[in-house]
Amino acid sequence: MNDRYKAMLFQNPEYVPITMGILPSAWKKYREQLTAITSKHPILFGSNQSQRDYDAIKGTYVEGSHTDAWGCVWENIHSGREAIVKHHPYPTRESVRGIKQPEKDMGFPHGFMYLRLADLRGFEELMIDFAEEPPELQLLIDTVLKYNIRQVKLWLDNPREEKRIVYFGDDLGMQTSLPMSPAKWRQYLKPCYKHLYKLMHDAGYYVYMHTDGHIHEIIPDLVECGVNIINPQIRANGLDNLARVCKGKVCVALDLDRQMFPFCSPADMDPHVREAVEKLGSPEGGLILVAEVDDGVPLENIDALATALEKYRSYFRT
């Protein structure tokens, strides 16, 4: 059993698991300079730094327009970063009455449940729906949930024995709050996640859930839904809040402060990582450190961040 599983299960990992994601925009901008940095950090990036195509960008990270199976049109004006939905296929309640599941199976892209609702309706229209609670809201939710149940069953028909932790991504929060009250979230959305994650658990899988934004009020609910590893943002929630609701209760794959990385100095990285480990970590486990960088982060900050991650992974090692 590797340290990631041990951290998730609070079974005394040898090291705090660490990972750093580098967006395509950073590879496209920095190229060989970034490879020189990743080569210095084999613990994070491996010892075999093979030849990389710095311009290889796929899917909605490609500049231009992209239409998905639901009819949402994604627009991208910055190659190497994610697109956003600019055309919503069900902008009126009348149009929602005719909603149907797509025939094409997309699996679980980022934004599979709550964000999918917003992509289909538009954020403002969806918020009005949650405020006024028309019957079309439940119809929309039920249709997306049924599609997602179909995706789970298709996934389970092709078992991946080597991968027992299954990734789900859905950003439930905004910068300083949830987009709706916790009570309304529990009424309409909690049953959806609980249903989907139970299917995974019943089949013997663990659930990793990435979710950006301010969500600490509903983390206990997500744990009740079956989340084994929660991946929240540090700035939107605060370390103290995360420690209060998570420590010893659920494994946190802590998303270090991406809003800080482009603007801080390299010297700020070490205390930032150390504080996270001290407040959320323990010898028993329950912590994974996650960092993501794009083309806005200076090379020297990427290097300093990687150095800090590799340093503090052994903080609890005896």
Image (cartoon, rainbow, N blue to C red):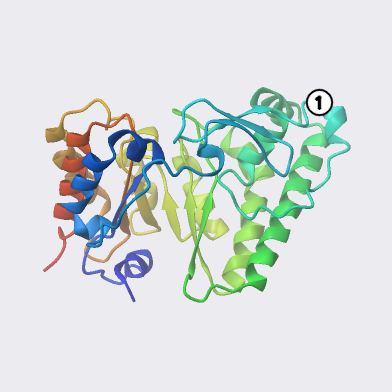
User: Does residue 158 appear to the left or right of 91 in the view shown?
Assistant: left
Question: In this rendering, is residue 125 above or below 162?
Answer: above
**Closer to us: 22 or 209:** 22
**Closer to us: 158 or 143:** 158
**Closer to us: 150 or 158:** 158
Residue at image location 17% in from the left, 35% down from the top: 300
**Which quarter shows the N terminus?**
bottom left
Image label count? 1
User: Does residue 24 appear to the left or right of 135 in the view shown?
Assistant: left
Q: Residues within 10 Å of mark 1 (few under 14, many from 20)?
A: some
Helix, strand or loop status at disc 1: loop
User: Does residue 97 appear to the left or right of 194 in the view shown?
Assistant: right
Residue at image location 64% in from the left, 27% down from the top: 123
Residue 40 visible: yes
Q: Mark 1 highlights which residue?
A: 92
Residue 312, given in percent of the width and then of the height, sits at 16, 53
Residue at image location 19% in from the left, 46% down from the top: 36
Residue 140, given in percent of the width and then of the height, sits at 77, 40
Question: In this rendering, is residue 172 above or below 49?
Answer: above
Residue 302, given in percent of the width and then of the height, sits at 22, 39
**Closer to us: 49 or 85:** 49
Residue 234 visible: no
Question: In this rendering, is residue 245 above or below 160?
Answer: above
For the residue marked with disc 1, what is the amino acid?
Thr
Residue 136, given in percent of the width and then of the height, sits at 82, 35
Q: Please identify the quarter of the rendering in which residue 28 is found.
A: top left
Residue at image location 39% in from the left, 58% down from the top: 249
**Which quarter shows the C terminus?**
bottom left
